[in-house]
Amino acid sequence: MEEMVKQLNIPDLTQEDVELKIKSIRSRNSSELAEVLRSEKSGAGRYNIYVPKLFWFKQADLFLRSVCTPRLSSSTKVSKQNLLLLG
C-alpha cells in the first residue's frame, strides 16, 4: 500500500486515504451489483433490469468479481439452492 501511495505522488495523500477510497469503491460497487441482481431476480422484463449509473461500474465490477468473494446471504428464507448446499 505504501508503494501505491508513493506512485500516486499526490501531496498529503496517506495510506489511510487510499484504504478508505478502496473500501468506498468496493462498497459502492457491491451495492450497485446487488441492485442489478435484485432487479434480475424480481422477474423484471429484459428492458427493466437496473442499469448502474456509475461510469466506472463495468470496469470495477470486472476486476472486483475476480478478486472478491461475496458473503453468504444472511436471509432466513430457505431457497432450493441453499437446501442443496446444506443437504
Image (cartoon, rainbow, N blue to C red):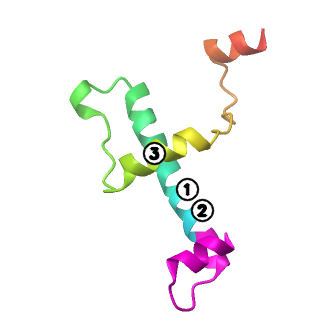
First in sequence: mark 1 vs mark 3: 1
Amino acid type at circle 1 is Ser
Residue 63 within the segment the image draws in magenta:
no
Q: Are marks 1 and 3 in contact (CB under 8 Å)?
A: no
Disc tally is 3
Assign a secondary structure to mark 3. helix
Mark 1 element type: helix
**Quarter containing the C terminus:** top right
**Nearest to viewer (mark 1 / mark 3):** 3
Q: Which of 85/78 is in front? A: 85
What residue is shown with label 1? 27
Q: Position of residue 38 (x, y in %)?
A: 44, 34
Q: Quadrant of residue 61?
A: top left
Task: Please report the bounds of the magenta region as a residue range.
Answer: 1-20
Contact flag, marks 2 and 1 (Cβ < 8 Å): yes
Looking at the picture, tell me which residue is in the foreground, 6 or 87.
6
According to the picture, the residue beneath numbered tag 2 turns out to be 23
- Separation of marks 2 and 1 at Cα, in angstroms: 6 Å
Query: Where residue 11 sits: x, y (%)?
Result: 52, 91
Q: Residue 5: which quarter of the image? A: bottom right
The residue positioned 50% from the left and 85% from the top of the image is 10
Against 73, residue 81 (above or below) is above
Q: Amino acid at mark 2?
A: Lys
Q: Any magenta on residue 9?
A: yes
**What label sits on residue 61 in the rendered view?**
3
Left or right: 85 in relation to 13 = right
**In the displayed structure, would residue 72 be above or below residue 1?**
above
Q: Residue at coordinates 66% horizontally, 34% vertically from top-left?
A: 73
Q: Is residue 28 left or right of residue 57?
A: right
Of the numbered discs 3 and 2, the one sitting upstream in the chain is: 2
